[in-house]
Amino acid sequence: MSLITLFSAPKPFTNPHIAMIQRNAIKSWTLLPDVEVILLGEEQGLAEAAKELGVKHIPNVERNANGVPLISSMFKLARENSTSELLCIINADMILMSDFVEAAKKVKGLRSKFVLLSQRWDLDVTAPLDFSGDWSRGLRSMVNGQGQLHRPAGSDFFLFPKSCYTDIPNFIIGRAGWDNWMIYKARKENWAVIDCTPSVMIVHQNHDYAHLPDGKPHYEHPETNENIRLAGGQANVRYTILDASHQLVDGKLIRPKLTSLRFTRKFELFLRAIFFFLPENVIENIARPKRWRKRIEKMFR
């Protein structure tokens, strides 16, 4: 029995660059100790890639009317086909290294209910990675020299005990909102939301959005509005890594330092609690006046 089951719904393997970075990512997962991998979906080339990489493949994922996999079905299938104590939904372009498993083991011993997440490092990867020898050392060197730490607005994986997230709405994968709801849900349930950015390097391989309708980023699609509706409204999809209750630093859980961004976020949540009867955009305008002024200026350009 593995400690962690990683599950993901990769994109079709038809685009050469997407296929390459997905193989890079999934291969890195298979090299981790105490981890099993489940790939979900019927996308072109997925069954062949799963066989090639020696991982489990489950094709029968429920989809919306446009044929996009539903997060709820992914979670259900992962639970039913895993004996691991910890589950982790992850995007299929993310490269993991051994520090990921070390962080999971450490947190498991410190909290019974939690979600582990982190900021990612963005890196241009144009060729298959060489996983021979001490490959992770070379990758870390590349990231330190060429990579960029992504802002804390997006989350590309969520690791949690099997007892958490048993009631996932029918979110549409690959669209915005559902990942923010994951953080909202954890905070609402009073689970520890643990940012492991100081302890773990998660590498995102950059790509374009040609795989999406009209080549638009996920947050510009109508299906994102459906995710927001299922999440309970805009206020519930504004949660980011800035809302983490803890950070994993040197093997210990500490409270995040109160930066200006975290202070603004805490102020916004305070206002929402006091003035719960006001529209969501009114609270945001009060808490983030600079942002609002920029929007006004943009409207009249």
Image (spheres, helix red, strand yellow):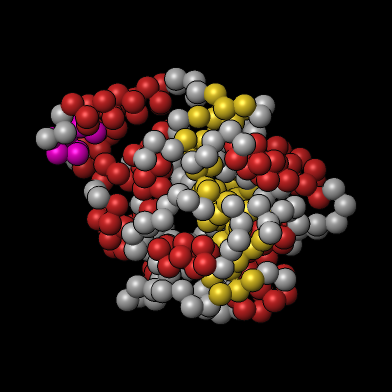
Of residues 91 and 38, the one nearer the viewer is 38
Is residue 290 shown left or right of residue 263?
left
Task: Assign the magenta stretch its main secondary structure.
Answer: helix
Q: Is residue 21 visible?
A: no
Residue 284 counted in the magenta span = yes
Tell me where residue 73 appears, x and y as whole percent: 43, 67
Residue at the spot x=41%, y=33% of the render? 243
**Outermost left residue:** 277
> Which quarter shows the N terminus?
bottom right
Residue 238 part of the magenta segment? no
Q: Nearer the viewer, residue 5 or 213?
A: 5
Residue 213 position, x and y percent, is 39, 69
Q: Residue 242 vs residue 156: left or right? A: left
Among the 4 quarters of the image, the one containing residue 57: bottom right
* Image spot of residue 257 (x, y percent): 49, 20
Indicate left or right for 27 with 116 as reference: right
Q: Nearer the viewer, residue 72 or 153?
A: 72
- Give me the residue at 76% from left, 57% from top: 31
Residue 133 in view = yes
* Residue drawn at the location 68% of the way across and 69% of the way down: 55
Q: Which residues are magenta?
A: 278-286
Q: Nearer the viewer, residue 11 or 58?
A: 58
- x then y, percent, for residue 140: 74, 42
Q: Quadrant of residue 143?
A: top right
- The image shows residue 192, relative to residue 271, as above or below, that is below
Label count reads 0
